[in-house]
Image (tube, grey):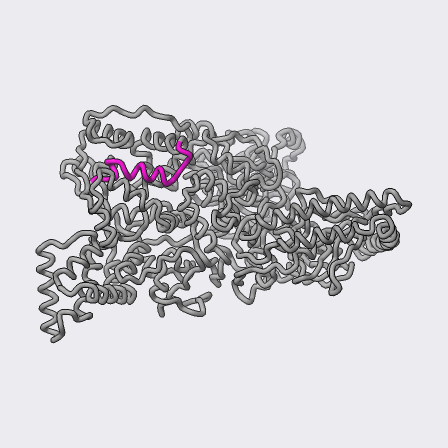
Amino acid sequence: MAKITVASVAVMAMFGAVAMAAESESEKDFTPQQIEFFEKEVRPVLAEHCYSCHSGEAEKLQAGLFVDSRAALLHGGDSGEAIIPGDVDGSLLIEAVRFESYEMPPEGKLPDEQIAALERWVEMGAPWPAEESGGDFARKTFDIEARKNEHWVWQPVESPMVPLVQDTDWPRDDIDRFILARLESEGVEPTGDASPMELVRRLYFDLIGLPPTPEQIAAFQQDDSPAAIEHLVDELLASPHFGERWGRHWLDLVRYAESRGHEFDDDARNAFQYRDYIIRALNDDVPHDQLVREHIAGDLLQNPRLNSDTGFNESILGTGFWFLGEWVHSPVDIRKDESDRFDNMIDVMSKTFLGVTVACARCHDHKFDAISTADYYSLAGFLQSSDYRQVRFESIEHNRQIANRLAEVDQRYREQIAEVLSRSDVNKPNRPRLGDGIVVNYADVSADEFMQNGFLFGAGPVGFAEPYWTSSDEGMSLQFAPADSAISDPVWNGLESVSEKGMASRNKLVRIPRSGRTLRTPTFTLEEAQVSCRVRGEGTVVACVDSHRLVAGPLHGETIRPIKANNNWVTLSLGRYVGHRIHLEFTPAKNSQLEIVLVTQGGDAKMRSRIDRRLQDASEDVSEFETAARRVLEEQAPDLVASWQRERDELQSQIMRRSRLAMAMMDGTGEDEHVLIRGNSSKPGDLEPRHFLTALSGDAPMKIVKGSGRLELAEHINDSDNPLTTRVAVNRIWHYLLGRGIVPTPDDFGVLGQLPSHPELLDYLATEFDADGRSIKRMIRRIMLTRTYGLSSQPNAESVAADPKNMLFHHRPPKRLEGEVIRDSLLVLSSRLDPTLYGEPVPIHLTPFMDGRGRPKTSGPMDGNGRRSIYTAVRRNFLSPFMLTFDTPAPFSTMGRRNVSNVPAQALILMNDPLVVEQTREWAKRAIEKIEDPAERLRWMYQTAFARGPSELEIAVGLAYVNGESKSRSVSLNDADVWADVAHALVNTKEFVFVP
């Protein structure tokens, strides 16, 4: 990496225009003494510390910046001007040499006298000899169109002609014709077909991740129809275990874990609901474009996908993937922490669905691909406009219908009451004028700005002098609002969560029952040290600074304040967060009513006193109005209020009050993100409007109807004109089935990724996938029934010599089973496997070597209660040694292609791990109980482990061992220890962990 010099501070500057005219004018005023000062005191410093990287002498110019002319310094490099003549403190070069932000030069701070000389030089206007003010300092442009045109992935998906082949009998599908045409053109012969039993074992592991049982093998062998394989594929695709197998692939993409990592490895609350969601979605063959839509914006769908059994909202659960990443506990620099989390979200989203590394453009335009820094921060804006929540997903759709009907009822009766009062001499009082300095005033909050998690605060604020309902020990009663307010509706009291586990007792925020009960203000920039809220009731207010409430900790306790007020002010002291984005979240105490009138920032007691007086006067006016209104209603419409209450009571009885929770997104205030100079969160540049990748949709701001715009983003990702999404999807399917993708780097289709081996086939699959409704199961089925998929794993020597890396797919490469599949297979052998679907994770089994902060208080059972590996808790700081040994990825970013290592530790763990020893012993006991004859017992064990019978030699060797050990140990031929050794030996073979 090139050395960073003093002058390279310019690349961290904010974007800005250069007033070139100022140069010519200022040059006329430079005195000889100033020029002499520059030559003696300034130029030597620049020459010594900057010219090697930032002048015409540099071997490679860094950051597009020249410092060997005044004009170049004013123009700047990649990001803007390095100096502002006359403004010492505003010049980032000075800031850097002072070591106030970027510490430059990196080899050590300049002597004080050199820093003083640079300061004086800038203060006097940066004098420079006129004859040297020019220079070639033109900035190298980022040509996104050129990059787009130069790389294949940005080109439209074409529907290629199916090629002709010489051996017309070989292909079973047009897919095979693409493969064979390439083989024939290269003079490479494909190998023969796999045996039926090899193919059966392959299908079981590829589709459900479990070995076939002897009974299942027998059932297949009894199907003598030509379509036997087709029938088996259909059967396995319909298995509920399909979703578990392919769900594990998907979890690798979204860096799934159930803890946050970092220092304390806090729980990622209810993360398992996302895992269950993706299993169900894959089992139901939810189209890929719908999965994309649900992941990006499932909370915003007008008609969400509902669970077929219970009717709960499935779509909203997809948004949980955004929040599966690592979180820092109580970060010191919360803006940087937010930027880091957004970076991970963008990285995972772009790799998973688009197959490009957008996160590489965080600090600068992508070095290789057609992705700009502006693209990166445009995507960050969608996240900045969204929030985290725990959603009551089981009840949200049912209760949404209740809330809509309740809003209609309330509106109808308010209109009827207004009509009755309009015929009387009772006049509504004038709304108070509260003056300036109010950040949030519920007198003028728009419908889009009235945001809440749940329905507790109704369809919108209650207007001044409008009727609303309150609850007390005596029951419900009607009152008139003394001010425009957001008021929680007691009809929603009693909401419960079936499971709402907290992360740790130290986190005060988690202990607040917020799910489905929280009102959120619009976002605003904190400009004053204090924020005050005029409220009535009991509850909690949380100041969410740069999304900080996600990781509330001891450093930020001042952001949480209890509320117990009767039309009083609650003030939060937030001086350390001035300049940050902020919104407030209000949650009433259990079964308490909370009213929020307004929010101010700053303001002295005099301002609050003025507001209090005006609100008090208005309250007195409303009180008189209420008395008169009640009299009129009792006289002219005596049953109206009672009828209103009856309809509300009927709706209240239908509310679903209990629900499970899941992490999900919630739309917030629509905001654009600043381009952070060099990715530095403390150096915001210009705002970048939200839009999709410029190379695909241009750089015009996206037309966003309201809120974050994530729904519009999802449609851009799914657009048929987007050449990335379908290519990436079909390539992943091919990768999981054939062992290597057509693009061998499934997460990176960019310049640094590998080129497709069969580009026409990739586009053919993408076209077919799109035309077939983007069905994942149907694409899997089609590929599995090809001749290519059914090839033997035994290649012929000539083909290996011609294509040693099998880039042409002339044979099926043997696949090493993943750690999860190996463990699950052991449970099948021992008959310990519990096939139950879904549910909370089984705690990780902790070995004595798994220690450190955040270690779970209790260890889970060694066999995980027999549950499949996908249901074992994934704790970032305490990952399973067994899984890690077999290359299960650490969950920090997208991993569409796992490493496949072959290391001694794998043999050691199969030999010595207590789980392996325990399960093979149980398998041996099962064999002894099931079959009396030793030879038949061996045949059954081979069939169970390898989906084949043993050879005569294997029978002879096995029996010789059993007989010999029985004699040497003086035990019977049915001794459990002897047969446990046999079982243990079988699982330590390559055949057990590899699928041909």
User: Is residue 141 among the parts visible in the rendering?
Assistant: no
Q: Residue at x 41, y 60 (%)?
A: 873
Near-viewer residue (262 or 793)? 793
Near-viewer residue (652 or 577)? 652
Question: Quarter-wise, where is residue 368 in the image?
Answer: top left
Relative to 940, is 787 above or below? above
Near-viewer residue (113 or 335)? 335
Residue located farthest toward the bottom when viewing the structure as drawn: 970
Give coordinates of residue 109: x percent, y percent: 52, 52
Give coordinates of residue 928: x percent, y percent: 19, 66
Give coordinates of residue 789: x percent, y percent: 25, 39
Q: Is residue 268 left or right of residue 790?
A: right
Relative to 275, is 856 above or below? below
User: Is residue 960 among the parts visible in the rendering?
Assistant: yes
Q: Look at the image and give the residue range highlighted in magenta.
A: 772-791
Relative to 85, is 279 above or below? below
Q: Residue at x 43, y 39 (%)?
A: 288
Q: Is residue 670 left or right of residue 436?
A: left
Give coordinates of residue 292: x percent, y percent: 47, 41
Q: Residue at x 41, y 42 (%)?
A: 285
Q: Is residue 380 magenta?
A: no
Name the quadrant of the N terminus: top left
